[in-house]
Image (cartoon, grey):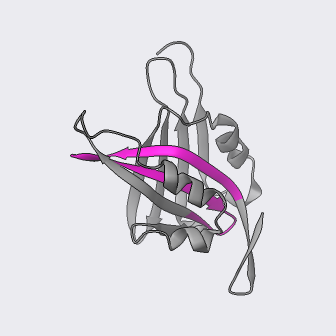
Amino acid sequence: MTDTRDGEDETQIAHLSGWFRQRPTSMEYWELLVTDERLVWCFVGESFKSMLLRADMGERGRKEITDATPDRALSFSERNFAVPLDSVRSIRLREGTLFRRAKLTVSWTDGDADEFELSATKTADSQVEDVAALENDPRLSHVDVAVETADGLF
């Protein structure tokens, strides 16, 4: 998929979908678009930790992101942001098992070092193949990409 942005071509490499970030009182739902120029972080919803208020509030936002260009996706929320691909240091996926959720950890340096650790939602598909494909992509040769596969139930 090629998107035009200010006269330049931007190619989407991967769409990592179905992730949430644990916060003290809530869970934030995020999508990650990987292009040949940047990582586009897309906030798609939030729910509270209370059992009565807990729900995956990101479903509608995920559908909008699926067909959007990276620039369009950035405009959906003021929480959305982009990290230049040159700033990305690592993308690590720990595969989920029957008893633990998959974890995706992305770190970058863009002025200050930063890191997001995300957990897979119950409805997230396994994205081991998607992240493994990033490991072999020459545009990400400077990024430490790793996939830790599960060796059992734990």
Residue 31 visible to the viewer: no
Asked if 11 appears above or below 52 in the picture, the reply is below
Asked if 138 appears above or below 104 in the picture, the reply is below
User: Could you say which quadrant of the image residue 151 lies in?
Assistant: top right
Q: In this orientation, which residue lies closer to the viewer: 1 or 147? A: 1
Q: In this orientation, which residue lies closer to the viewer: 145 or 6? A: 6
Horizontally, residue 67 falls left or right of residue 46, namely right
Q: How many marks?
A: 0
Q: Position of residue 92 (x, y in %)?
A: 54, 42
The residue most toward the bottom is 7
Horizontally, residue 154 falls left or right of residue 145, namely left
The verdict on residue 2 being magenta is no
Name which residue lies at 61% across and 33% down.
126
Asked if 107 appears above or below 118 in the picture, the reply is below
Q: Quadrant of the N terminus?
A: bottom right
Q: Position of residue 14 (x, y in %)?
A: 68, 53
Q: In this orientation, which residue lies closer to the viewer: 26 or 100? A: 26
Q: Position of residue 66 (x, y in %)?
A: 63, 56
Residue 127 visible to the viewer: yes
User: Principal SS element in the magenta part?
Assistant: strand
Horizontally, residue 9 falls left or right of residue 23, namely right
The residue most toward the top is 152
Q: Which residues are magenta?
A: 13-39
The verdict on residue 19 being magenta is yes
Name which residue lies at 50% across and 74% down.
75
Q: Position of residue 95 (x, y in %)?
A: 55, 29
